[in-house]
Amino acid sequence: MATAASRPSPARWRRIAFNAVAVLLAACAVFWLHTHEPGYVERFAPIIVRGVPGADVAARGFSVAIPVDAALETGRILLTPGITGTAPPERQPSSGLWLSVPVRIEVSRDPGRVTAFLRDRDGREYAATAKSSAEPGHPFDHGGQAGRMFESNLAGLSLAPGFPASGRLYFEVPANRLQGLHARFHLGPVMTPNDNLVDIDLGIDRGRAEALRSAATPELRTFMVRGGVL
Amino acid sequence: MSAAGWWRRQGPWLLGAAVLAAGAVAGPYFDRQREFRIQRAEAARAVPAGAWGRYAGAEWRLRGVTVQDQAMLPRDLQLPGNARVLLAELEIRPDPTAAGESNVARCTLRLRDGRGRSWQSAPEALLTYVRRAGLALDCERPRDRPVGQPYVARLPFLLPDDVAPAALRLELQLFPLPPEDVEPPGTYLDMALPGGR
């Protein structure tokens, strides 16, 4: 009787083995869950919505398109409108290049502003140059040109649903960083966790980068002057 | 050892595990529900068309709306081709207390359509028009009106022409939010437009 009690029965061994396997499996599951838990970056990182030029890229709250019928342009000095009509345009020379990207932006839900920047192959980012504070349509009379001034720069423009805005964005980029640039857009001045970030590859390969560098105009204007009475 | 015996012996543990599992699911669920309530979902205070609504130490009434097509607007405003202006006449009866008066001026107004799109009052594109036509930028009492008296604020909205005014509702909220002892956080007035839904 005493020997039978001190030596566990095969059924008891089976139970112990079963429990041990169950505990091991549970520990493996806990370990796997722990190692695969989304990290801080994954939980709060933006959700990237990728697109190509020519396509309307729809993200949460807004959509962006880079029209292919309008070309990328480059220049060495950026000309922005002066505050008053008779003031000369402001000149911003660059040691690199000014890159002008055509865009069409529309907010689809609430009014707001879209922030845009370029990202190069090494992850460096270049913010779009802010629109001048000159009022659109203000009279312009300078350098033999007279009319009303309208800015093509859309950076920081206040947008509302149903009113798509077409224009351009202007970025200052080092001359050797054109290749592989992506344009990125998000809603609002700062990104909140898991915000949609639209990423459009501008499709600048080595040859096109070279062409853009050699085609750089001395002066790139962010505005146009329309003559006549409105 | 029968299977029934095993279940009986493990009963209390299984029950405990079931209670813990239910708690683990229900806890975060109710937490989120509370957050949603604070954020928005149940914060709307509906006001029928033409009726007075009480909010943040004042009474509010949407007296009427006027739609102005491009033909009725000055040409040099440079508005988009599909734009039209909707003027909302908001009647405000502030409580005759200092707190009531100071609260109401900071109103933000939004028109929202059935698809969830919204438009803010006095957008940048209309600032020139606001200045010229003597319209309001917010719900502040006009300087020529005595303190404590009801007054009317005429606020312009810029809408695309594919939106029917009947499909819109006016959302009114003070920003920054009124103190918590005046209104629960997130509360806003959800006003029907005359002849609207």
Image: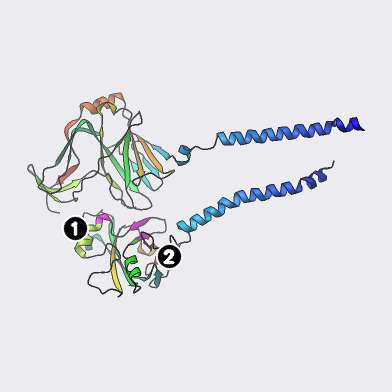
Q: Amino acid at mark 2?
A: Glu
> Is A93 within the magenta?
no
Q: What chain letter is assigned to the residue under label 1?
A: B
Residue that sits furthest to the left in the current view: A144
Q: Residue drawn at (11%, 43%), measured in percent from left and top?
A: A88
Q: Residue drawn at (91%, 32%), measured in percent from left and top?
A: A2
Q: Quadrant of residue A202?
A: top left
Instruction: Determine whether, in the image, residue A163 is placed left or right of residue B1.
Output: left
Task: Note whether A27 is above or below B52 in the view shown.
Answer: above
Q: Quadrant of the C terminus of chain A?
A: bottom left
Q: Amino acid at mark 1?
A: Arg
- For the residue carrying disc 1, how many other residues have a C-alpha within 10 Å: few (<14), some (14-19), or many (20+)? few
Q: Residue drawn at (35%, 38%), measured in percent from left and top?
A: A184
Indicate how the structure is coloured in the image. Answer: rainbow
Pointer 2 residue: B183
Q: Quadrant of residue B147?
A: bottom left
Pointer 1 residue: B75
Q: Which residues are magenta?
A: B109-125
- For the residue carrying disc 2, how many other residues have a C-alpha within 10 Å: few (<14), some (14-19), or many (20+)? some
Q: What chain letter is assigned to the residue under label 2?
A: B
x then y, percent, for residue B171: 38, 62
x then y, percent, for residue B87: 29, 65
